[in-house]
Image (cartoon, rainbow, N blue to C red):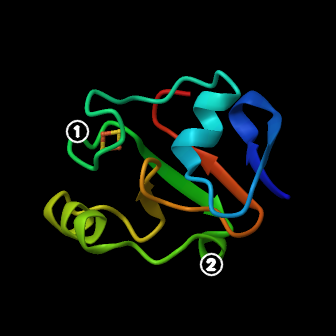
Amino acid sequence: MCQVFIPKRNITLRAFPGQTIFDVLRKHDVPIGSSCGGKAVCVKCKVQVLDGMDHLDTPGREEAQVLAAYSFADNERLACQARINGDITISTLYW
Ligand code: FES
């Protein structure tokens, strides 16, 4: 199991390796922005990875295009695309 720590809410969520951040948040009823249902289109699910960036998979082609088009910072990912392979710490602008 992996852990997703959210400092602003002081909660730690358990996740299976290979799950997306988006799926983990929704499973635990943590609000995450989305109007595309996790299709890498709306960009509302952007999260900041405060720790454990190397515990996420490499962005796929669709996510890489979004990251470049919207000038994401090096520690930002789409929650609906980023798959967890170890412990991470995340935040958003609205938590
Ligand atoms: S939910 Fe729309 S881009 Fe991730």
Is 32 in front, or is 26? 26
Q: Residue at x 53, y 74 (%)?
A: 57
Is 36 in front, or is 44? 36
* Residue 71 placement: quadrant: bottom left
**On the picture, is 11 further left or further right than 80?**
right
Q: Residue at x 36, y 65 (%)?
A: 73
Residue under circle 2?
A: 54
For the residue carrying disc 1, how many other residues have a C-alpha within 10 Å: few (<14), some (14-19), or many (20+)?
some
Is 10 in front, or is 33? 33
Tell me the amino acid under the disc marked 1. Cys
Contact, mark 1 vs mark 2 (Cβ under 8 Å) = no
Residue under circle 1?
A: 42
**On the picture, is 61 further left or further right than 32?**
left
Q: What quarter of the picture does the N terminus occupy?
A: bottom right
Q: Residue at x 35, y 30 (%)?
A: 34
**On the picture, is 78 further left or further right than 86?**
left
Q: Is residue 23 above or below residue 9?
A: below
Cα–Cα span, label 1 and label 2: 25 Å
Q: Is residue 77 above or below residue 45?
A: below
SS at badge 1: loop
Tell me the amino acid under the disc marked 2. Asp
Name the residue furthest left. Answer: 69
x, y percent for residue 9? 73, 28
Quadrant of the picture in which ligand 1 is shown: top left
User: Residue 13 got which mark?
Assistant: none
Q: What quarter of the picture does the C terminus occupy?
A: top right
* Residue 23 placement: quadrant: top right
x, y percent for residue 29? 65, 21
x, y percent for residue 47? 48, 48
